[in-house]
Image: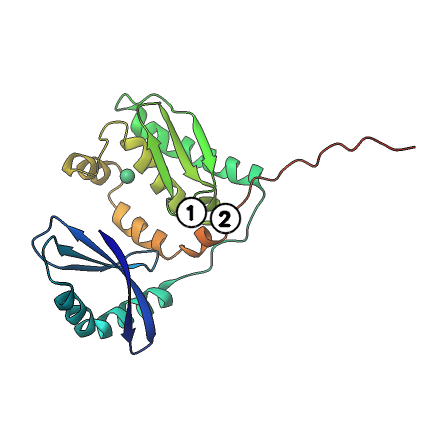
Amino acid sequence: MEQLWLVDTPDGPVSVRLQRKRVKNLNLRVGTDGVVSLSIPMRFPLSRAEDFLREKSDWIARTLARQRARQVDPMPPVSWEMCVRRLEEALDRVYPLAASLGVPRPPLKVRALKSQWGNCHWARGYITLNAALARCPEGLRDYVALHELIHFLHHDHGPGFYARMDELMPDWRRRRRMLRSYAAALEEPVQKEKRPRAVSPTV
Ligand SMILES: [Zn+2]
């Protein structure tokens, strides 16, 4: 079950995604995209969930405000070709780290994704990076590229995955934190330019 609720906060009404899940406790979180969600146990009364959200309304407003304050302006948009070049370069920079672990150099696909910086299609042997990364600093592109490469070795985000990241890029957590402040780049996706159709000349 999933519902959208409206909660009054000191900064105005905020939408909250409410989900019933197989969890023991209420879990309220504000995503990096500014989406507020609350998971509640399967049989938890909705009226109590509502009370809980009312109690937490100050916290929700504060967290959202802090998140907005942390946002920075992404670099100016560039052409699709430049996006592809910047992301290929990022992959080239970090690939040697994965090569030493036996990961073959995957083909890179650049896409305009809405809510993900990248993706590893390990079964098909390629990775996807979001064109919006081209508007983020180089060190953050490198972090996402390495993250996706490591998924060839560890498909999920288990302890093995994080241990490998710690080993190869000890400051990856700081990079991940910084990347969150570039969420504005996701809102304005770089589009692949369509070639103008050749028009037959008229006489
Ligand atoms: Zn991942």
Query: Is 143 positioned to the left or the right of 86 in the image?
Result: left
Residue 68 picture location, percent across and down = 37, 66
Query: Is 13 positioned to the left or the right of 1 in the image?
Result: right
Q: Earlier in the sequence, mark 1 or mark 2?
A: 1
**Contact, mark 1 vs mark 2 (Cβ under 8 Å):** yes
Check the image and report above or below for 71 versus 8.
Answer: above
Residue 170 picture location, percent across and down = 24, 43
Tell me the amino acid under the disc marked 2: Pro
**Label 1: how many Cα within 10 Å (few below 14, some 14–19, many 20+):** few
Residue 188 picture location, percent across and down = 50, 53
Q: Quadrant of residue 138?
A: top left
Split into 4 quadrants, where in the image is the C terminus? top right
Residue drawn at point x = 28 percent, y = 52 percent: 174
Which residue is outermost to the bottom?
Answer: 10
Residue drawn at point x = 30 percent, y = 49 percent: 176
Residue 160 picture location, percent across and down = 16, 34
Residue sitting nearer the eye, 140 or 40: 40
Ligand 1 closer than 8 Å to the CB at disc 1?
Answer: no
Which residue is outermost to the right?
Answer: 203
**Label 2: how many Cα within 10 Å (few below 14, some 14–19, many 20+):** some
Residue drawn at point x = 28 percent, y = 24 percent: 100
| Residue bearing the label numbered 2 | 189
Residue 114 numbered tag: 1
Query: Can you tell me which quadrant of the image ligand 1 is in?
Result: top left
CA separation, marks 1 and 2? 7 Å
